[in-house]
Amino acid sequence: MIIEASAPTRVDLAGGTIDIPPLFLFHEEASTVNFAVSLMAHCRIETRDDDRIILESVDQKEKVETTVGEIGSLRDETRLELLAKLVYFFKPDRGFHMTTESEAPAGAGLAGSSTLNIACIGALNKLVGDRYLPDRFIQIAAAVECQVIKVPTGYQDYYSAQYGGVSCIHFGPAGMTREELNVDAATLERRIVICYTGEPRNSGTNNWEITKRHIDGDDEIFQIFERIRDTSVNMRLALLRGDWDTVGGTLAVAFPNRKRLSPNITTPQMDHLIDVALDNGAIAAKVCGAGGGGCIAFFCEEGRRGEVESALAAEDRVRILDWRIQAEGLSVRVSETHFN
């Protein structure tokens, strides 16, 4: 049996970091807005006729092997730790070879690890006979990733990976709900440039340190998060109304507030690229994910995306990403094979 699963990465437009529990409980109407992009994470599982378990990452050029009888060893495996902990959680009772690969650049800030998490869960759940309903996948993904990074993790990335499209995820005491936003996708695609800076992301935002400061009652942090909440509320409304001027204005206002939260969200090279883009038709920049490298999304003036792309492409190490909005989320396909 061959199981092939894929899930889309994402660009976060507004509300980043407020999706980490328990931060959203202190900011009424907390939400995040993001859209899934067609840079996919892939997981392929091929069952074996013996009890060997092989975990392989194409991107990391790493491989881990064990057997069904020794699956407990994966609990504390430090190589390919996310894959190991996911397999340990599901505990399949048959041998298989699992291979993973991502289309997004390494350290892009496009939620590659969270997206791969969802793809692997979809594939492993199929391997063990659909043990869990899909509405449990996000809870499992967040719990296992927390075991890996050893601090609470945000939730928005799992929603884009599982459901795709343009979304607003609402957070509150009653839980989390996803709202699919009916947005003019063609306009959004036409006005956004996504560039990879050539610098892998290096934790520009220390989410755990920020979380601790918030819980400890840091008033400056609280006010920054109030503005993050307001940005997300305004972004949702602007997208639903097709008010592209407000979309650009909201992103422009959000950037300096995000810099106040974490000055290391940009590197000197990123600051230079932002200046280049703004000089050539971009209205605002959105550093993807935690920053400190990775990708930047630029919202452009109508008709000037090409100018922004050309100016950025002329810079050293920069790669303009080819993407579209991915309307579909997690996909799992099963086919039969015969052993040699």
Image (cartoon, rainbow, N blue to C red):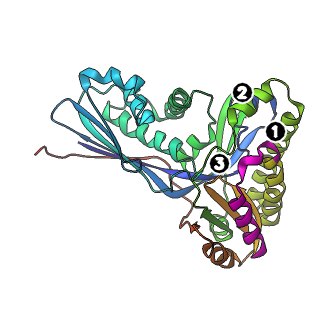
Q: What residue would you read off at disc 1?
A: 225
**Magenta residues, dominant SS class:** helix
Where residue 204 appears, x then y in whole percent?
68, 45
- Does residue 76 lie above or below 312 as drawn? above
Which residue is at 78% across, 57% downward? Answer: 251
> How far across and how far down the image is residue 189, in percent?
63, 67
Residue neighbourhood size for the residue with mark 2, other residues' Cα within 10 Å, grouped as few (<14), some (14–19), many (≥20)? some
Q: Nearer the viewer, residue 132 or 73?
A: 73
Q: Is residue 287 above or below residue 218?
A: below
Residue linked to disc 2: 22
Magenta span contains residue 54: no
Q: Residues within 10 Å of mark 1 (few under 14, many from 20)?
A: many
Can residue 172 be seen here?
no
| Type of the residue with mark 2 | Pro
Q: Amino acid at mark 3?
A: Gly
Classify residue 257 as left or right of residue 120.
right
Residue 289's disc is 3
Q: Name the residue type under label 1.
A: Phe
- Give the side of residue 301 with respect to residue 143, left or right: right
Distance from disc 1 to disc 2, alpha carbons, whole Å, reads 13 Å
Residue 30 tag number: none
